[in-house]
Image (tube, rainbow, N blue to C red):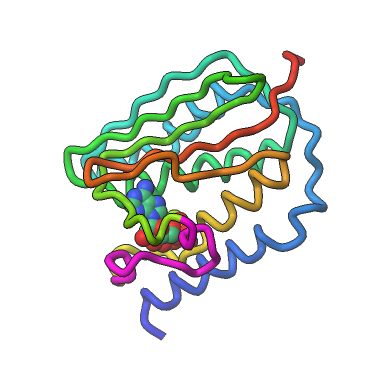
């Protein structure tokens, strides 16, 4: 096996483990979304610097009930993509707000966009847009499938809210909780 193949397979195994039996993961943490976003920004800053992307966030003081580990992974995967599929000098904006009694988590990037006919398929396991199939991009195409699993498991959903040659915005909607 080549090193890239090993890296790919271990990434696959890790994600499959995460996807297995997600229903069994307890979802009773009270999660403050702003500190969670801070943590993700801190954890992804090295990757962002490597790719010359700046990270920004604007987070209202919002709580949800769920699995802290899974919600972390969900937002992490979206922000990781927003960095990975961006262009040098680009930016990523995380926005967490309240709307119609729901929490909305948006991740907006300044990348090349997602072709209209791929905007549903990208949530399927192993689907990757042609350009990102190259080795240098790494990844196996499971990140967004996991994002959707986690959102649905928490009573919410995820969509490509907008996408053009100037960038893409993903939006996750989740039920709000009272401060706890
Ligand atoms: P993995 O997340 O498993 O490491 P991956 O990033 O290729 O691999 P997904 O996160 O599921 O897999 O994304 C699927 C595909 O959707 C990507 O390969 C890429 O082509 C496209 N994509 C995802 N996010 C973006 C984005 N923000 N901008 C442009 N294309 C994107
Ligand atoms: Mg990904």
Q: Is residue 95 above or below residue 168?
A: above
Percent of width and height locating residue 41:
42, 32
* Res 116 → quadrant: bottom left
Q: Is residue 127 above or below residue 76?
A: below
* Res 58 → quadrant: top left
Q: Which residues are magenta?
A: 120-134
Q: Is residue 5 above or below residue 62?
A: below
Q: Can you name the residue that lies furthest to the front here?
A: 117
* Residue pictured at 40% horizontal, 60% vertical: 118
* Residue pictured at 72% horizontal, 63% vertical: 20
Q: Can you name the residue that lies furthest to the left here?
A: 89
Q: Nearer the viewer, residue 118 or 78?
A: 118
* Residue pictured at 43% horizontal, 70% vertical: 7
Ligand 1 image position (quadrant): bottom left
Quarter of the image that includes the C terminus: top right
Q: Nearer the viewer, residue 96 or 102?
A: 102
* Residue pictured at 35% horizontal, 65% vertical: 129
Q: Nearer the viewer, residue 38 or 113?
A: 113
Q: Is residue 74 above or below residue 116?
A: above
Percent of width and height locating residue 156:
66, 39
Quarter of the image that includes the N terminus: bottom left
Percent of width and height locating residue 2:
36, 82
In the image, is 59 to the left or to the right of 165? right
Q: Can you name the residue that lies furthest to the bottom here?
A: 1
Q: How many marks?
A: 0
Is residue 58 found inside the magenta-colored segment of the image?
A: no
Percent of width and height locating residue 70:
65, 44
């Amino acid at each position: 096996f080549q090193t890239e193949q090993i890296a790919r397979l271990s990434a696959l195994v890790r994600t499959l483990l995460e996807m297995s039996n997600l229903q069994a993961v307890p979802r009773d943490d009270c999660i403050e979304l702003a500190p969670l976003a801070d943590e993700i920004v801190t954890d992804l800053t090295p990757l962002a610097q490597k790719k010359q992307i700046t990270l920004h966030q604007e987070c209202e003081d919002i709580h949800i009930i769920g699995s802290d580990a899974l919600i972390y992974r969900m937002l992490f995967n979206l922000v990781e993509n927003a960095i990975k599929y961006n262009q040098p000098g680009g930016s990523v904006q995380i926005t967490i707000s309240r709307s119609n009694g729901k929490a909305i988590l948006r991740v907006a990037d300044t990348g090349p966009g997602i072709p209209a006919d791929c905007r549903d398929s990208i949530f399927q396991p192993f689907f990757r847009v042609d350009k990102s199939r190259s080795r240098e991009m790494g990844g196996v195409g499971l990140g967004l499938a996991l994002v959707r699993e986690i959102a649905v498991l928490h009573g919410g959903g995820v969509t490509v809210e907008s996408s053009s040659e100037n960038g893409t915005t993903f939006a996750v909607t989740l039920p709000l909780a009272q401060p706890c």
